[in-house]
Image: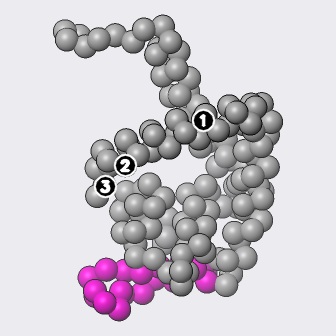
Amino acid sequence: MVGVRPFDTVEDRAWRALVHVADLLPRHLDNEMEDARRISVKEFAILLHLSESDDSTLRMSTLASDVGLSPSRTTRVVETLRRRGWVEKTPDATDGRATTVAITATGREQVGPAYDVQVEGARRILFDHISREDAQQLARILRRLSITLSREDRFD
């Protein structure tokens, strides 16, 4: 391609490794969560965000932004959770055009055990294989990437 500066060797290795991990990690964690708790990583993320919110309720648009899903994907995942009785959807009291989602007691019961599965998987996959310093550096790098990607988020 004309005008595009190619990757150097370090950039190429880093980029390929990132793309590979970004592909494998969600599938691996999803399989573990599904096998252990019958919940996907995205379903868990929604329940976790709701359980950590001030009144266990969030607007659908806020929830989508918080978990990094498109509004339509968030709607589908929330509907799955609603059918299981883990969340409830209601019209927003201040804006009837918006929808709020609240975690139910049954949904809240899913959070702790699913969190444990996620922590065990993260330790086995990642933290058992890197030093504390590596983890700190990784956190700094991923935080910067997250900020960059959030600025370019096309779902807002």
Q: Nearer the viewer, mark 2 or mark 1?
A: 1
Closer to the chain start, of discs 3 and 2, is 2
53 with respect to 35 (left or right)? left
Q: Is residue 140 visible?
A: yes
Q: CA distance from mark 3 to mark 1?
A: 26 Å
Q: Residues within 10 Å of mark 3 (few under 14, many from 20)?
A: few
Q: Quadrant location of residue 21?
A: top right
From what the image shows, is residue 14 above or below residue 156?
above
Write the start and end of the magenta stretch as one range. 81-104
Its colouring scheme is one colour
Task: Provide the secondary structure element on which disc 2 rests.
Answer: helix
Q: Nearer the viewer, mark 3 or mark 1?
A: 1
The residue to which callout 3 is attached is 155
Task: Provide the secondary structure element on which disc 3 rests.
Answer: loop
Do callouts 2 and 1 mark residues in contact (Cβ within 8 Å)?
no
Question: What residue type is disc 2 on?
Answer: Ser
Closer to the chain start, of discs 3 and 1, is 1
Do callouts 3 and 2 mark residues in contact (Cβ within 8 Å)?
no
